[in-house]
């Protein structure tokens, strides 16, 4: 089969639950707004149930109806990716996300088949992570095998670009930061708090997303005593699905009403409500290549209190759009959160976020991706 579309996107889109799915659908819609409507090849089934650590990798509802979406991929059947290659024959550009070595066999089949069937199609690997967050030697080797098969590589921070340029000096490697879709209407903080039962004047810090070790939820937990000694009125919310040891969080939180737990998958509407209600988003990552949560914070005009990791230092400017501290330092994190309250930094940092976030707009992201494929808009 020959694709009638200049661009084919391969990857999860909602109702699949992940930041990758959210970013893929935003990219597809931004391309369509620019006049290049892509075809999206997505999953009819993703991870085998025994390998997925959460409750479910799929939410309610169907695929987006405003895009051409075909569910042809099956994570339990790598050869379904060869069918995706056949569907993309004739396209000028195919965009394939990379984030975990689980997909290495699948992606290798797709990339090699497409090179054979449609050598003029440019194959772009959009790298959300170079290696798994809990990666080892075998996973690194699998990632490199996939990178070798791509024509173009895009990463989300400068250090990863430097690493790929050194490892693959003959490949074109571009830096394309994680997109952030600005809210057209500034959040109604008071209205959101009323709906959530949050006191209007309480300083509210939000940790959201899947609670995984690399995101440092336990670092924030360790910072709470020092934070509450300085700011007894501060409220900290953990909102997201708990994986692994994070499932024990209810037994580990300090006594009192200054911590609220919403330990479940939050759909886009509920997550947006918490982002509207908060004063700052906390991202105490141990390491990160990019952050969909930080992008969501910017979209809602909220500053980020995070760590000096690759995925944040290219997005958050310390003292301007947030506060950055060393990773794995509960004391430094508590001090930054206390300073945020003590100096009343919320309004100034939020105003800066609204000014600076335009450069991460999904349409700018889409333009960069399209230009890599030789498509100017």
Image (spheres, rainbow, N blue to C red):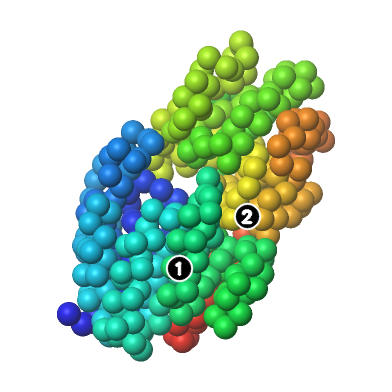
Residue 52 pos. (x, y %): 35, 40
Q: Residues within 10 Å of mark 2 (few under 14, many from 20)?
A: many
- For the question of whether residue 175 can be seen, the reply is no
Mark 1 neighbour density, 10 Å: few (under 14) some (14–19) many (20 or more): some
Which numbered marker is on residue 145? 1
* Location of residue 285 by image quarter: top right
Assign a secondary structure to mark 1: helix
Foreground: 128 or 235? Answer: 128
- The image shows residue 230, relative to residue 161, as above or below, that is above
The foreground one among 5 and 319 is 5
| Quadrant in the rendering for residue 235 | top right
Query: If you read the primary sequence from the N terminus, does the residue marked by circle 1 or circle 2 appear first?
Result: 1
Residue 284 visible (yes or no): yes
Which mark is drawn over residue 359? none
Q: Where 240 falls versus 183 (above or below)? A: above
| In the image, farthest residue toward the bottom | 120
Whole-percent x and y of residue 312? 66, 53
Q: Is residue 199 above or below residue 89?
A: above
The residue furthest left is 1
Q: Which residue carries the number 2 mark?
A: 311
Left of 76 or right of it: where is 97? right
Q: CA distance from mark 1 to mark 2?
A: 24 Å
Dot 2: what SS?
A: helix
For the point 65% across and 30% down, the residue is: 220
Residue 316, image x and y in percent?
69, 54
Question: Front-most of 305 and 273?
Answer: 305
């Amino acid at each position: 089969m020959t694709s009638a579309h200049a661009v084919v996107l391969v990857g999860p889109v909602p109702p699949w639950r992940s930041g990758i799915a959210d970013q893929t659908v935003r990219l597809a819609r931004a391309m369509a707004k620019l006049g290049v409507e892509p075809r999206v090849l997505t999953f009819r089934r993703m991870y085998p149930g025994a390998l997925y650590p959460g409750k479910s990798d799929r939410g309610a509802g169907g695929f987006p109806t405003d895009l051409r979406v075909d569910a042809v991929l099956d994570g339990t059947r790598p050869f379904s990716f060869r069918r995706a290659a056949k569907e993309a024959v004739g396209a000028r550009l195919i965009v394939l996300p990379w984030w975990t070595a689980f997909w290495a066999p699948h992606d290798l089949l797709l990339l090699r088949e497409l090179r054979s069937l449609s050598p003029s199609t440019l194959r772009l690997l959009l790298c959300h992570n170079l290696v798994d967050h809990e990666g080892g030697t075998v996973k690194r080797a699998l990632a490199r095998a996939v990178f070798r098969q791509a024509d173009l590589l895009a990463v989300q921070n400068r250090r990863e670009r430097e690493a790929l340029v050194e490892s693959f000096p003959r490949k074109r490697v571009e830096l394309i930061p994680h997109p952030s879709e600005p809210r057209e209407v500034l959040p109604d903080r008071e209205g959101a708090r009323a709906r959530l039962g949050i006191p209007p004047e309480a300083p509210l810090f939000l940790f959201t997303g899947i609670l995984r070790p690399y995101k440092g939820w336990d670092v924030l937990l360790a910072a709470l005593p020092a934070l509450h000694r300085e700011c007894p009125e501060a409220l900290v919310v953990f909102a997201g699905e708990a994986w692994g040891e994070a499932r024990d969080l209810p037994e580990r939180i300090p006594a009192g009403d200054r911590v609220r737990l919403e330990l479940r998958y939050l759909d886009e509407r509920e997550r947006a409500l918490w982002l509207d209600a908060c004063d700052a988003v906390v991202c105490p990552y141990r390491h990160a290549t990019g952050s969909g949560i930080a992008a969501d914070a910017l979209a809602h005009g909220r500053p980020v209190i995070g760590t000096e990791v690759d995925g944040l230092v290219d997005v958050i400017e310390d003292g301007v759009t947030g506060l950055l501290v060393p990773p794995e330092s509960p004391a430094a994190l508590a001090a930054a959160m206390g300073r945020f309250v003590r100096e009343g930094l919320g309004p100034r940092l939020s105003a800066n976020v609204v000014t600076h976030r335009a450069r991460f707009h999904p349409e700018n992201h889409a333009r960069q991706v399209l230009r890599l494929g030789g498509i100017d808009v």
